[in-house]
Amino acid sequence: MTAPVLEVDDLRVQLRTPRGTAHVVNGLSYSVGPGETVAVVGESGSGKSVSVLALLGLLPQRVATVSGRALLQGEDLLSMPPERLRQVRGPGAGMVFQDPMTSLNPVLTVGRQIVEGLRAHADVNAAAARRRAAELLGEVGLPDPERALDRYPHELSGGMRQRVVIAIALSNSPALLIADEATTALDVTVQAQIIDLVERLQTDHGTGVIWITHDLGVVAGIADRVLVMYGGRCVEDGTVDDVLERPAHPYTRGLLGSLPDLAAPVGPGGEVPDLTTVPGLPPPPTDLPAGCVFWPRCPVRGDARCETEQPPLVQVGSGRSGHFGRELPHRAATWCSEEVR
Amino acid sequence: MSDVLVSARGLEVHFPVRSVGLRRTGGGVLRAVDGVDLDIHRGETVGLVGESGCGKSTLGNALLRLVPPTGGRITFDGSDVTALDRRGLKEMRRRAGMVFQDPFASLDPRRTVAQTVAEPLEVHKLRSGRRERAARVGELLEMVGLDPAVASRYPHEFSGGQRQRVGIARALAGEPDFLVCDEAIASLDVSVQAQVLNLLRRLQRQLGLTLLFISHDLSAVRHLSDRIAVMYLGRVVEVGPAATVASDPQMPYTQALLSAVPVPHPARERARQRIVLRGDVPSPSAVPSGCRFRTRCPYVFEPCPDVDPALQPAGAPGQLAACHLHGVVGIPVADDTPEGVTTTPTS
Amino acid sequence: MTGQPLPEPAPSPTATDAGIPSTQRAARPRWRETLGLLARNPAAAVSGALLLLIVLVAVFDEALAPTGPNEISVEDRLQPPSLEHPFGTDDLGRDIFSRVILGAAVSLRVGFLAVAVALVIGSLIGLLAGFYGRWVDDVLMRIMDMLFAFPAVLLAIAVLAVRGPGSGNTALAIGIVYIPVFARVTRASVLGVREEVYVRASRSVGASDLRLLTRHVLPNAAPPIIVQTSISLAFAVLAEAALSFLGLGTQPPNPSWGLMLAEGRGFIDIAWWLAFFPGMAIFLTVLCFNLLGDGLRDVLDPRQRTLMAGGAR
């Protein structure tokens, strides 16, 4: 059994906002093994992005209060001095965001940006760094990497830019790669290429991946484990098969039901049935319900405790052992897992 | 009265590309829409899919003359849209509404929901009197699932899904026959997307609307549409009944596009066979000769570089594909250099 | 205070499909919200209050002034400030306090008139140039460039030379000088708004150009123009003072701050109060207009607006 790359324990994030204190992440615990992909799924406002920004100390300290523990290869990211955190960010954890333009500097060539990343964390001379940069661009599938080094970000297509960002994220062979909606802005064909790329690099380097997305299709393809977030809490987690094929939480079920299916059976009149929707909106993080976070929108509400008592995250299915010999229980935070089944 | 409500024939929208430098000569042409043939029948929903930059949004805008077409013909209910005078255009815009992608940008931040929704009523003088207009606004808001009491509020007080409902209410205010939804669900959350999809379908049935649903999301298009049209590089390359296009595509591009869509079922997803295309989409200012898909097509053969394929019957009834695999039909590429292009001898 | 945007409505089981509960307080009008926010910027609030006071003084000038503007009293010549004459008297024994009050009317009237001329003509030109673009833009803005390239004082002097001195003509001259400023500010703002989706959306329902311009483009392009108006008022008051100082503006014996400054110059070493009090009046007014302009700039920026609404909680 190998030690996990990342172990998050009871992560909590509060943001001071004009509307009061927002409880954005409320007690999140999970771990990512080497070579493992954990998908964090949720809608906007579920806290999925904030939870990883908090790990890397990327939230503005003025407004954010972060507590809990997050061990990256045994070192606690949350109690680390800022200088150490900066050192760790490159080689320890790389990050890829939704919009590649926000992570690339428009006035520097692609090559320069990769070289800077390399030289910030390793003692290499300029020529060697440039050679390595070209290698990296080749590795992420950019045609003619030598020439691409001298290009500016705006000269590349969206897919190519995202490859460059991935190359930068991978330039220091991090143990952990965090992809935050990394393919959301891309076309499906390009998305498929990027996913392939990450999967290949992951197999080659044994990188642990946190893949944040709202796209359950992508999750089904890429994830080993899934963590469904709602209202800043993990409402369900388990292997990708457990969560997507046998969802136990009413929210997960609602989310899956609201997806149109490309291969849906057609009725006699050429009719496709209506989508089942989750009515209403997620609760504002400044004003979370007292009981189950999903209660106000829940179609089940099968238990008296729903409205008043927070359901704990408990095992709902038989645990199974996944890769790396770890127990991968299927858990859900709901009083109603029986009714849902 | 014809069964076809909106029709495009050889529709072109070309934008001049200004070259760098003082001399404006030598600038190329960006072929955003480049010879589109499309018929939209009364009461049906046509889904228009394609990747970013394929011209699907430009096509939607051109059909309503929000972008001026540079060639070809558009007819709306029998009349030539490109030849409409001011009054005719105004009336057409009452009869054809549009829902935009970004619900945060498409509502004027300084106007209340009521003012926004009432705009078509005022422009077309559809309801006289303040009270009647207010009643109609309330009716419209209710129709899209909003509480009429929100009419006096400003857009910034609403979530994305709610704003999109306001946008739909505005588009419906003129009692249109035709509604263009341009990526109307793209910036919404998954569960909200489903709400809006259901709403659009309900409205389409309730009001007998003809719908053009433009989206890059194939699953959503398949869900909502009766027919699907697939665009590639400014051209409709396949069109047909939604179920057949989705399950049995005839054009290699459609096949590749569909095969790239991930499905939210792990077992099916693992079994999914993907067709990976070579390279990137060519620039719309340098469209390949002959078949525009030939640079990436896995099946290229003899006629592809020379003959621009026309849409022709392929697969199921009602299905058309622009592909030589279904017989060589199209316009041969002229051998001689077109006028105005000078070639420099390579010596 | 309840200046901030409404919170996201909390979904309740009885909510409609879209999750909006039916009981919601009505939105506050925008201008009241703007005033509320402005009140929280101390510099802008004090400036606004002071300007209001100055305007009131200018309006009720004759009722407020203890003496007439041109009441000469030879025995009271060059009196330093005292209880009887708070700002002292000038070389003809006229009460400076009264003249500063009466001068406020002259200076402000010229300032407001000048800015009104520039605002109306300049904004219209900028609006048309920005909205229609192409040749309209080229023609209008090249004319503005020419006007702009002319040295401002020379241009004003030329206008006054043609039309003769006097406060009305001074206002016109200053107004013409500021037309290109407003044209440019408006055009820049309109260029941004013109491309907004909501303008296209409004076009898509059949709205005419006139409607687009008046209902959507102008209101959304207005904030920088409002700020420019406030700052221009400061410059116009200064310009009036400068022109009067040069003898081209308001003609003696009428009191205008600039003119009083000019007249007091000769006595600066023996009777400082002659120039000091009109100078202070100019300084205060200009400062207030500038601070108010800065405050408005912050308040009218939607992003700033959200921040400030929260920050002041």
Image: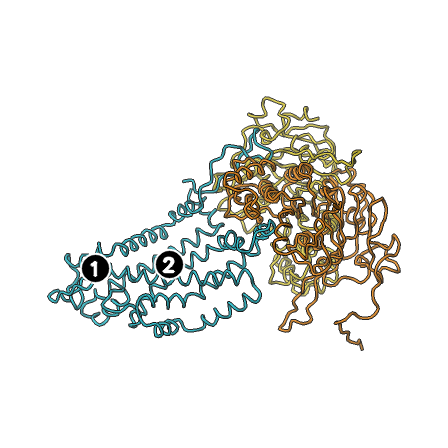
Residue type highlighted by circle 2 = Asn
State the residue position of label 2.
C290
Q: Residue at x 72, y 62 (%)?
A: A145
Q: Quadrant of the N terminus of chain B?
A: top right
Kindly identify which numbered label has been placed on residue C238.
none
Horizontally, residue B294 falls left or right of residue C114, namely right
The extreme front residue here reads B1
Chain in orange on the image: B
Q: Quadrant of residue C136?
A: bottom right
Question: Are discs 2 and 1 both within one chain?
Answer: yes
Q: Residue at x 43, y 73 (%)?
A: C150
State the residue position of label 1.
C98
Please tell me whether residue B234 is drawn above or below residue B17 in the rendered image.
Answer: above
Pick the residue in front: C30 or A110: C30
Question: Chain C appears what colour?
Answer: cyan
Q: Can residue A75 be seen?
A: no
